[in-house]
Amino acid sequence: MIARDPDELLGEARHGSRSALARLITYVESGGANQRATIARAYRAPAPYVVGLTGPPGAGKSTLTDRLLATVLAGGTLEDEPVDEIGVLCVDPSSPFTGGAILGDRIRMQDHATNDRVFIRSMATRGHLGGLALAVPDAVRVLGAAGFALVFVETVGVGQMEVDVASAADTTVVVTNPGWGDAMQANKAGLLEVADIFVINKADRAGLRETRRDLEQMLDLGTKKDPRPPILETVATDGSGVDALWSAIVAHRRLLRGDRREEHRDTQARAELDRVLAVMLRARVGELAAGRAYAEQIARLRAGETDPYLAAEALLSES
Amino acid sequence: MIARDPDELLGEARHGSRSALARLITYVESGGANQRATIARAYRAPAPYVVGLTGPPGAGKSTLTDRLLATVLAGGTLEDEPVDEIGVLCVDPSSPFTGGAILGDRIRMQDHATNDRVFIRSMATRGHLGGLALAVPDAVRVLGAAGFALVFVETVGVGQMEVDVASAADTTVVVTNPGWGDAMQANKAGLLEVADIFVINKADRAGLRETRRDLEQMLDLGTKKDPRPPILETVATDGSGVDALWSAIVAHRRLLRGDRREEHRDTQARAELDRVLAVMLRARVGELAAGRAYAEQIARLRAGETDPYLAAEALLSES
């Protein structure tokens, strides 16, 4: 791959070049000389509106995204703004298990993949400092700089990594299925933190009532979100409930663009900066661990001559 | 609470004072003047052997721990070493949801709670810098310094926090139940990272074969552990399979005390140091975020005048 100037590529991407856009996302994903230049330009453009869809594998996120794309493409506007182009980022932090799943997603979305108003990209962990937790927000910004007003980010799973990825979304939809009490129970803290909207997809299956009850209880006990996240029901395979889901997304967006606009932007800027700060500081730990002073402290720890707190302070004061 | 000298308390704890021991754990848990002095002494004593039990709420970890206690108390030795006293730390990182669960655990273990060879303590997030991820290993070391050769650490959940807590264990047992395919699927990366032994508890219930098959597949695809973690079946309520579980734990311990002793100790020392380094660096992010330079960078980010990478570098170079 011959490196090309990010400015030039961005100009081409704005004029509809998908290959230029793909190249820019590769830059932010894989590090290297053009990463910083691409990021610098991307963050100086307005951010697109980002809808996150997250949930365990098999929940039906791709089919749901596909249906939402159809709804938006048919409607043509995002409430007050026209939507010419829609970006879709498919993120699976738990690779190497997921090559197949991502491929499957692509195939299922193939009708829209050939629609020239839709740009679909799978993202996997690569050379980016900080991995997907940083590469995904950066790719979102690249899409924004290329003129995309709306981006869907589809994330597999509901662990810490997905919480980080979701923090790049403006509106986060958590997708569950009937009968998933245990999976939700195991991740309730993360779910409550990220969800603006809950969807019980495959709502025509047994166990719907119990799952709704579990979700309601979880919200009763622990949500800090205001307004309380609605719980919607969909059957993505036949499209039932998808229009109502889109309405709920638009309603949440309206909130963020109204009174809470300043607060939301401030929160987003802080989340972006804290993510990068945390990653840079983690990289410091890696650098420290490669040094001779670290090896000496490990030897002293093993000999019972120090404790991890003293050892860490010694390393940080020396560095 | 009147603060007392950690040296004096440690002397009393070594002579069997449970209240002195409880006070020392409170010191490492809640920060303050005596935390560092307690930690300094604790890490200069030999570490106890730590068995971690982790799994979602309701998996039966407490009943299983209770049965394992009975097995060890009846046998009286840990292979080659006598076991006079056993520590049990019950950790639930997902509080505030769990006051009830911890109380329930205590009640279920009450037979052994009144056995003067057993010390049981629930741990919740408090003032400790770094929370439970540091407080639990510190408490384990306090138990070691007080003369406990064996400590069980029971942790609710299987997310990142539990991975951190589990890294303080020598042998980690992941407890599942028949029918928990989804919960496992959602956390497979974490499970594969921590599990030395898998247990399917409540093995008399429907779905055993499917769960075993799911676990075997997960191990086929992703385990880096050598030897491959065994999958055992137990019914904790009637004690079935508990002796075999204890044998598997002892077999894993034998491995760690044999050829791999040096490697294991090195890994442990690095894990301890990296945990503390990471926490201290996270605290740095918090300090940075409270400063005026941070507020300025946020304003510039919101105005599109900079990007998070430049902003973070500016903050780190100034600090």
Image: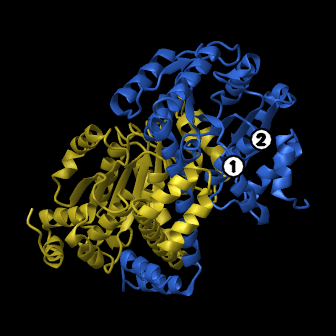
Chain colours: A yellow, B blue
**What residue is drawn where x is 46% and y is 75%?**
A269
* Residue designated by label 1: B95
In this view of the protein, can residue A172 be seen by the observer? yes
Quarter that holds the N terminus of chain A: bottom left
Query: Which x, y percent locates residue A83?
Result: 29, 67
Query: Which x, y percent locates residue A254?
Result: 48, 69
User: SS class of the residue under badge 2?
Assistant: strand
* Residue designated by label 2: B121
Whether residue B199 is situated above or below residue B262 in the rendered picture: above
Disc 1 crowd rating (10 Å Cα; few below 14, some 14-19, many 20+) is: some
Q: Earlier in the sequence, mark 1 or mark 2?
A: 1
Q: Nearer the viewer, residue B139 or B204?
A: B139
In this view of the protein, can residue A250 be seen by the observer? no
- Is residue B62 found left or right of B56 in the rendered image? right
Q: Nearer the viewer, residue B105 or A175?
A: B105
Q: Nearer the viewer, residue A128 or B59?
A: A128
Query: Which x, y percent locates residue B306?
Result: 36, 83
**What residue is drawn where x is 41% and y is 39%?**
A59
Identity of the amino acid at label 1?
Ser
Identify the chain of the residue marked 2, using the numbered disc in the image: B
Furthest residue in direction left, as rendered? A2
Identity of the amino acid at label 2?
Arg
Whether residue B294 is situated above or below residue B232 in the rendered picture: below
Q: Tell me how far mark 1 sits from mark 2, CA to CA.
A: 15 Å
Furthest residue in direction right, as rendered? B2
**What residue is drawn where x is 55% and y is 31%?**
B174
Whether residue B203 is situated above or below residue B12 in the rendered picture: above
Query: Which x, y percent locates residue A186?
Result: 57, 40
